[in-house]
Image (tube, rainbow, N blue to C red):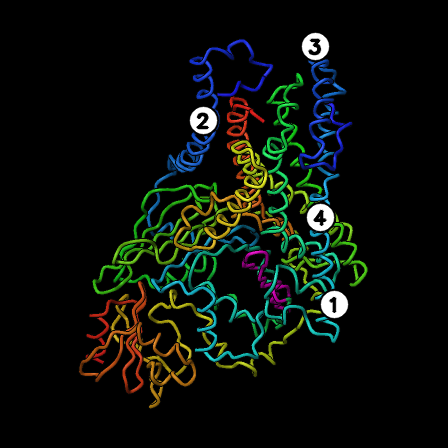
Amino acid sequence: MAPYGSDDTTTADENDDLRSGRRKAARYVVPVAVVGVAAATIGLVPALASSGDPDLPEISAEQLIEKIAESDVEQLSGTVKISTDLGLPDLGGLESALTSGALGSGEGGSSADPSTKLTELVSGSHTLRVAADGPDRQKISLLGKASEYSLIHNGKDVWGYDSETNEVFHGTAEESGKHEEEVPATPKDFAEEALKAVDDTTSVTVDGTAHVAGRDAYRLLIKPKQSGTTVGAITVAVDARTGMPLKFTLTPSSGGAAVIDAGFTQVSFAKPDASTFDFTPPKGAKITEEDEAVEEGRAGRAPGKTPGHDTPEGDLPEGEPRVIGEGWNAVAVLETGGEGIPSGDELEGDLGPFGDFIDSFGDKAKGKFGEGRIFTTRLVNALVTDDGKVYVGAVTKDALVKAANAG
Amino acid sequence: MSRADLDPAQEGTGGTAQESAGRTARTTQESTEQRIPLARRGSLLLNELRTTLRRWRTLALLGVLAAVPVLVGIAVRIETGDGGSAGGGTGEGPAFISQITNNGLFLVFTALAATLPFFLPMAVGVIAGDAIAGEAGAGTLRYLLVAPAGRTRLLLTKYATTMAFCLLATLVVAVSALTVGALLFPLGELTTISGTRISFTEGLGRALLIALVVAASLTGVAALGLFVSTLTNSGIAAMATTVGLLITVQILDQIPQLDAIHPYLFSHHWLSFADLMREPVYWDDLVKNLGLQALYAAVFGSAAWARFTTKDITT
C-alpha cells in the first residue's frame, strides 16, 4: 500500500488507520445528506403548501352559481396548466399528422391558423398564458418547447402567430369573434360549458374549499344523477372574491385520472401591460389572411371544437345533428350521407397504413341499426354504422348501442 | 503551487521528471510558510486558468464551438438566398432558426440551442474530466499537493477553472454567432416568441442573459465530470465516462416511459433558456433548471471533495 498523499490540513491522524477510515466514510455523509435534504424538500414543500383548506363563509350552490354568472372579471393575466387524458394512445407528432390528414386541412393550411393549432390541446399537458383587458383585447399563448403560439385579439384584429415556423394568421374580429368561444382553454370556458348542462338530471353541491393559484376558492361539485354516462364528476374551483372559476376537473365514471384538468397555476387580476396585445407581423413572416385560409382548407377548419368538450347539445361540424335522450345521456346522431365515415378500408386510399391503425381503435357492434364500429375514449364514445350514421355521446358503450337501437 | 515555470502546453510525460524535480524543490521550500498571502491564492486560480487555456486541446474545442454558428449562418444564408425561409417553414431544425433571416441576433439563440445539447457539455466534460485525473495520469498531481494549498483548495480551484471554461465556451459561441449574424443578416428590432416587439438593445441584453443561463446550465455536468475525475487516474477514462454519462442522460430524457425521472436529469430543462425570449419571461422552468444545476453541483461537488480528500494519491 502506497503512502497517503500528504493532505496538509489533516496530517495529525494520517497514521491512524482506524480513525482515518472513519473519517473517510464520514466525508461521504455530506453528498448523501445533500441528496437527502433535496429529496425531503421536493417531497415536503408541495405537501406543506397545499395543506389546510381556507376557512370561508358557508355558501349554497345556487349562490355560488350566481356568483360565477355575476363575475365581471375583465382584466386578468395568468398561467393555465391544462391536461387532457382521453385515453387515446400518445402518438406525438404522428397524431397531428393524422388529424390534419384525416380532417382534410391539407398542405395548404397555415400552421398559425387557430383551428389547426389549438386542436393540439386535445391531448397531453400544455401550458397556456392568458391575458385579458376588457372584451376587445385578449391574448392566449400556447407555450411550446422554445416556441410559442399566440392568439391575439386586439380591437378589430385577430392575429395568430406561430414563432416556430414564423407564420402569421390574420383575421378580423367580426368574422373571427367566434374563435374565443370555439376553443375552450381557460377554466372559465370549461365551467360555463359545464353549467349549461345543469338541469334536473344533475346534482350541484358545494364541496368545501381549496387553495388554487394562491387564492381562496370554493369547490363546486357537479354530478350527473343518471347512470350510463361516462362523466363521473366535475369539480370547479371558484375564486371566493371574484367568482372567477380557477380550476376545472372532469373525472370519468370509470375512475382513474381526470380526463380534463385545467387550472390556473398563477393568476393576477391587475390590468395587463398594453404592449401585451400589440402585434406587428415580424419581417419575413408568412402571413395568411383568414379569407384565403377559409378557401384553402374549408374542411380543415371545422374541428375547432375539442371532443372532450362536446357537450351533448354541442354542434357538430357537418349535417344537422339529431339528439336522442336527454341530459347527460344525450346522444347526437349525424347523417353523413350514403358514403359512410371512417372505416379503415375506405380510408386506406387516403391514409395508407393509418387505415389499419384506425381499424384497431374500433370494436365491431351489431344491432337494429345494422353493423358498425364503436370508437371509445375515456369520455366520448362514438358509434359509426356502415351506412354512414354516427352516434356520439358522453355515454358508455352499452348506452350508446341502446340509443342507436332506439333511434 | 507555482506552475508558471512549467511549460503550460505540456501534457505528456516527456520532460516532466526534470520539471517536476524543480517544482518539488520550490514547493518544499514554500511549504514552510504557514499562511498563504491572499494574492497567491488568486494566483493558483490564474495559473490553473492559464494552463488550461494554453492547451491545444482547449483551443481546439473552442475553435469547434466557434465554427458551429459560422456553419449554421452560412447554411441558412445559402438556403434562403432565393427568398425562402429557413427550415422550409415547417418548424424543423434548432429553435429560432426560422427567424435568423429577419434578424441576425437570432443566430445567437439558434447557435446556443444547437450547441447546448451536445457540443458545449462535451467540451465541458473534457475539461472537467481531465481536471484531476489528467494531473494524476501525467504524474503531476502529487507535486501539486506538496504545496500547502491543501486538497480542498485545489479541488475548488479546479472547479472554478471548469466553471470559467463553461462561461468562456458559451461566450465564444455567442460572440461568434453575433458576429456572423451581423455580417450575413440584418439587425434591428426583434419579435419575441410571444409576438411582442423589443428593441435591439434589449435583445442584446437578453442574449447576454441567455448566455449566462446557458453557462450556468453546464455547472451540473462540470461537477459530475469533476467527481468522475477524482475516481480514476486516467484522464482519457474520466473524459470518456463523463461524455458517456452525458449521452446516456440525453437518451434517457427521450424515453417517454421514464418521464417520472425526467425532471431530475440535468439536461431536462436545458432548453428552458428560450423562455427568456417570451414576453413576459416565463420563469418556472428557468428556476427549475438553475435549482437542478445547483443541486448537481452540491451533490457531485461534495462527493468529489469526499473522494479527493481521502484518496490515496500515488501519482
In-front residue for pair B253/A43: B253
Q: CA distance from mark 1 to mark 2?
A: 52 Å
Write down the residue under mark 1: B77
Classify mark 3: residues with Cα within 10 Å, few (<14), some (14-19) or many (20+): few
Kindly report which numbered mark, 4 or 2, lies closer to the viewer in this rendering: 4
Write down the residue under mark 4: B60
Position of the C terminus of chain A by quadrant:
bottom left
Q: Looking at the picture, do discs 1 and 3 lie on one chain?
A: yes
Write down the residue under mark 2: A33
- Horizontal placement of B226 versus B200: left or right? left
Is B211 contained in the magenta span? no
In-front residue for pair A205/B219: B219
Residue B125 visible in the current orientation: yes
- Callout 1 secondary element: helix
- Horizontal placement of B27 versus A258: left or right? right
In-front residue for pair B229/B10: B10
State which region is magenta: A140-165
Amino acid type assigned to the residue bearing label 4 in the image: Ala
Q: Looking at the picture, do discs 4 and 1 lie on one chain?
A: yes
Q: Are marks 1 and 3 in contact (CB under 8 Å)?
A: no
Q: Is residue A297 above or below residue B16?
A: below
Image x and y of residue A342, in percent = 35, 81
